[in-house]
């Protein structure tokens, strides 16, 4: 039987107890010895928080706070989390979450998560995992656009 652990939305940039939550996931992984761990995204930021394609007047309140802070500390947090998981002898499968691209490009997130593409598959034991990227939106001009660097907040009538 295949065993795995799934987690999502650590949001290390906005939720203060991320270290405790990561320690709990890692602790449970050591105890239960799953075949793999899946991160469903939104772990944190992978870039400078001033790196945004979103006009200031369109930024949500929490997004604007990070933008004005103009820092790399959240990228450092995310890298620290990924480093913690890399110490385990258990594969970590990463999926792109929408907030993983709030202040960076999709290619930055792909490189940081060390995944081959924004969609891929992974064979583990008797399981084939198919990883898909749903981080797109339909622009006001009806074009499919990659979500990156907060660009979706500029659209008034976006569809997902």
Image (cartoon, helix red, strand yellow):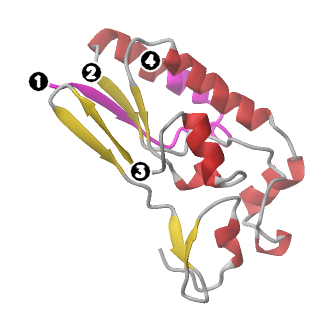
Q: Label 2, label 3: how many angstroms apart (C-alpha)?
A: 21 Å
Q: What element carries label 2?
A: loop
Ranked by sequence position, the earlier of labels 4 and 1 is 1
Residue drawn at x 61%, y 36% is 112
| Residue occupied by mark 3 | 119
User: Label 3 neighbourhood size at 10 Å, few (<14), some (14-19), many (20+)?
Assistant: some
- Indicate which label's residue lies in the foreground, 2 or 3: 3
Ranked by sequence position, the earlier of labels 2 and 3 is 2
Q: Label 3, label 4: how many angstroms apart (C-alpha)?
A: 25 Å
Q: Label 2, label 1: how many angstroms apart (C-alpha)?
A: 9 Å
Residue drawn at x 48%, y 50% is 118
The quarter holding residue 53 reads bottom right
Residue drawn at x 87%, y 47% is 69
Name the residue nearer the viewer: 59 or 143: 143
Ranked by sequence position, the earlier of labels 2 and 1 is 1
Q: Is residue 88 above or below residue 18?
A: above
Residue drawn at x 57%, y 26% is 82
Q: What element carries label 1?
A: loop
Name the residue nearer the viewer: 128 or 73: 128
Q: Is residue 11 among what the camera can see?
A: no
| Residue occupied by mark 1 | 1
Residue 92, x across and y down, in percent:
42, 27
Of the 4 image quadrants, the one containing the N terminus is top left
The quarter holding residue 127 reads top left
| Residue occupied by mark 2 | 35
Residue furthest to the front in view is 116
| Residue occupied by mark 4 | 26
Ranked by sequence position, the earlier of labels 3 and 4 is 4
Ranked by sequence position, the earlier of labels 2 and 4 is 4
- Indicate which label's residue lies in the foreground, 1 or 3: 3
- Indicate which label's residue lies in the foreground, 3 or 4: 3
């Amino acid at each position: 039987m295949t065993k795995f652990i799934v987690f999502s939305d650590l949001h290390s940039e906005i939720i203060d107890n991320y270290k405790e939550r990561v320690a709990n996931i890692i602790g449970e992984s050591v105890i239960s010895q799953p075949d793999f761990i899946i991160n469903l995204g939104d772990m944190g930021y992978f870039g400078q928080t001033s790196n945004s394609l979103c006009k200031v007047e369109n930024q949500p309140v929490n997004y604007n706070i990070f933008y004005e802070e103009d820092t790399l500390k959240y990228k450092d947090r995310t890298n620290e989390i990924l480093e913690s998981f890399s110490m385990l002898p258990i594969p970590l499968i990463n999926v792109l979450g929408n907030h993983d691209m709030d202040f960076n490009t999709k290619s930055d997130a792909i490189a940081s998560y060390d995944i081959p593409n924004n969609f891929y598959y992974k064979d583990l034991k008797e399981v084939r995992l198919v990883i898909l990227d749903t981080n797109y939106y339909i622009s006001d001009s009806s074009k499919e656009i990659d979500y990156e660097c907060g660009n979706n907040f500029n659209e008034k009538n976006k569809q997902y």
